[in-house]
Image (spheres, grey):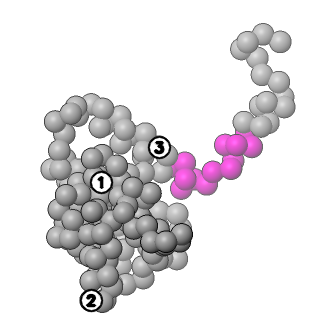
Amino acid sequence: MNDTQMSAKTTAAIDETVDAFTAEERAAVKERAKELKAAGGRGPRAGKADGESEVLAKIAEMAEPDRVMAERLHAIVKASAPVLSPKLWYGMPAYARDGNVVCFFQDARKFKSRYATLGFSDKANLDEGAMWPSAFALTKLTAADEARIGALVKKAAS
């Protein structure tokens, strides 16, 4: 067998791998690839304004009630941690410090979930003992929830 031919077993393994991802997961990966390509074309001077307009556009595409929550979360993050820069991450609104995503919002439709999610990456400074939450399910935002989120984001960005 030459270098350009694959065995039936190898081809089957590749087909199985491709089927291992849902359509939503494949779409998220494609969105991430576009984000990386766009970021490379913007150069080192690309700033908060570019990321913010992209995040706001993505939020505007969301269905109710996630759009309202995402708008509110965007305002909370900006007020609680102005050091974080808005950016898209796998097609989701995210907030980064020094280019590293600290937190993100995943609307329920993203992966056909029954709730939206506020998630924190391993770059978030939320470590507390040997176990701590890294994501929160959101169905609505109360004043108490907003205050808790503000405190979490501030701590995560510190």
For the residues labelled 1 and 3, say whether their Cβ atoms are less than 8 Å apart.
Answer: no
**Residue 76 left/right relative to 6:** left
**Residue 31 left/right relative to 60:** right
Amino acid type assigned to the residue bearing label 1 in the image: Ala
Residue positioned most to the top: 2
* Magenta stretch holds residue 101: no
Dot 1 falls on a residue whose secondary structure is: strand
Q: Is residue 64 above or below residue 94?
A: below
* Residue 125 at x, y percent in the picture: 36, 63
Residue 43 vs residue 1, the one in the foreground: 43
Residue 36 vs residue 19, the one in the foreground: 36
Principal SS element in the magenta part?
helix
* Residue 76 at x, y percent in the picture: 23, 73
Residue 138 sits in quarter: bottom left
* Residue 107 at x, y percent in the picture: 41, 68
Task: Determine which residue is flagged by label 3.
Answer: 30
Q: CA distance from mark 1 to mark 3?
A: 20 Å
Q: CA distance from mark 1 to mark 2?
A: 25 Å
Q: Nearer the viewer, mark 3 or mark 2?
A: 2
Range of residues picked out in magenta: 15-27
Task: Determine which residue is flagged by label 1.
Answer: 96
Amino acid type assigned to the residue bearing label 2 in the image: Ala
Q: What's the residue at 42%, 46% (across, down)?
A: 31
Q: What's the residue at 78%, 10% (across, down)?
A: 2
Q: Nearer the viewer, mark 1 or mark 3?
A: 1
Dot 3 falls on a residue whose secondary structure is: helix
Task: Determine which residue is flagged by label 2.
Answer: 143
Q: Looking at the rendering, in which quadrant would you find the N terminus?
A: top right
Disc on the earlier residue, 1 or 2:
1
Q: CA distance from mark 3 to mark 2?
A: 36 Å
